[in-house]
Amino acid sequence: MKPRAFAALCLLVPVFAFFDVQATSPVRGTWTVEEACSKVVEIQANFRTAHGQHGDTIKIARADIKPGATQGTVQFAIVRAAGTFNFTGTLVEDQGSGQVEFAANPQFAKEMAELGYSNLSSEDVFRMAMIDVTPQFARDLANVGYSKLPLEELIRMRIHGADAEFVRALAGVGFKGLAPEDLIRMRIHDATPDFIQQMQTAGYSGLAPEAVIRFKVHDVTPEFVQQMKQLGFANLGPEELVRFKVHDVDPEFVSQIQKLGFTGLEPESLIRMKIHDVTPEFIAKVKQLGFNNADPDELIRLRIHDVSPEYIARAQSYQKDITLDEIIQHKVRGDRVEHM
């Protein structure tokens, strides 16, 4: 098999690399290459210490991966504040493999100690290198009110991108002094300052972080709010909006229900109709059978007791002017309609 030109390399996908972290020696592991295409190479590095197995993704621009001294070999480095990952190996055809070595930067521990993070273990330094926790990241957070966070919180904030810029942007829309966990969860669920501002414009100001997160989790959007306002629901509370989404009370459903004569319903009635599968089609069939004045509660009871339009029609054929309540009672008792 002849070595292929280095330009064939598109993406690095290393296998699990297991490491033993020691304070006096570099951290070593292995990597492999599989064919794919990407301008940014994502490397999944995995390692094992006395405390268990760990892993994370580190990235490098494809252009920074260089040919080695001999044909088919490669070498590249990923430099982080906490230290440097040095990769060497071979690339033949579309497959490659090699070794990776991490060397800690002694200056990193000194700078972090000045910021309140003293006595970092070699494992702490390695983990911080993997996700690129820098002294500047910690300093920037300190400048916006988050100094000397517990190390695990600092790491999680870096993982999820809850940085100083995010904190300042949230403060600009009224969210100040949030707990680190709230910042992290808002980042995880993409509760951005732009989204918050749009919801404020739609009439939902003064929300707690949890309410904003629930909006994002359940896809309550400014567009959804506007559509509901156009259908007559201008004053829905945050929890009602969420429950509408949870139970799929969407604009189309509400519009169809209203066209069937059900205007001015309370939000809870619409939610219960959805929960019990009182569909526009079901309502139309009941109306066609002569029950034009059936209210939501009666329709819900029909569904709860599995009273179908066919059962209603059969009951009417045996008893003229029968009411929905009587039909429900027959169904509950298990009466056969031909014996009415």
Image (cartoon, grey):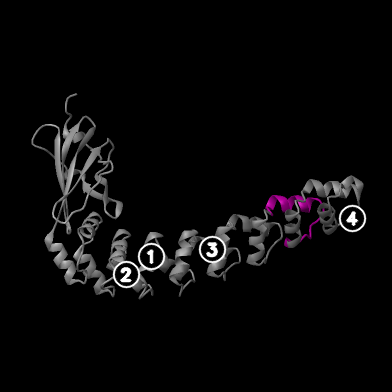
Q: Quadrant of the N terminus?
A: top left
Residue wearing tag 4:
321
Residue at the location (39% across, 68% down)?
A: 182
Disc 4 from disc 1: Cα separation: 59 Å
Q: Residue furthest top?
A: 1
Disc 3 from disc 2: Cα separation: 26 Å
Q: Is residue 52 above or below residue 229?
A: above
The amino acid on which the numbered mark 3 sits, given as a three-letter code, is Val
Kindly check if marks 3 and 4 are in contact, taking CB atoms under 8 A apart as contact: no
Please report the bounds of the magenta region as a residue range: 278-296
Residue at the location (18% across, 69% down)?
A: 113
Q: Is residue 236 left or right of residue 73?
A: right
Q: Is residue 32 above or below residue 117?
A: above
Q: Secondary structure at mark 2?
A: helix
Residue wearing tag 1:
194
The amino acid on which the numbered mark 4 sits, given as a three-letter code, is Asp
The amino acid on which the numbered mark 1 sits, given as a three-letter code, is Asp
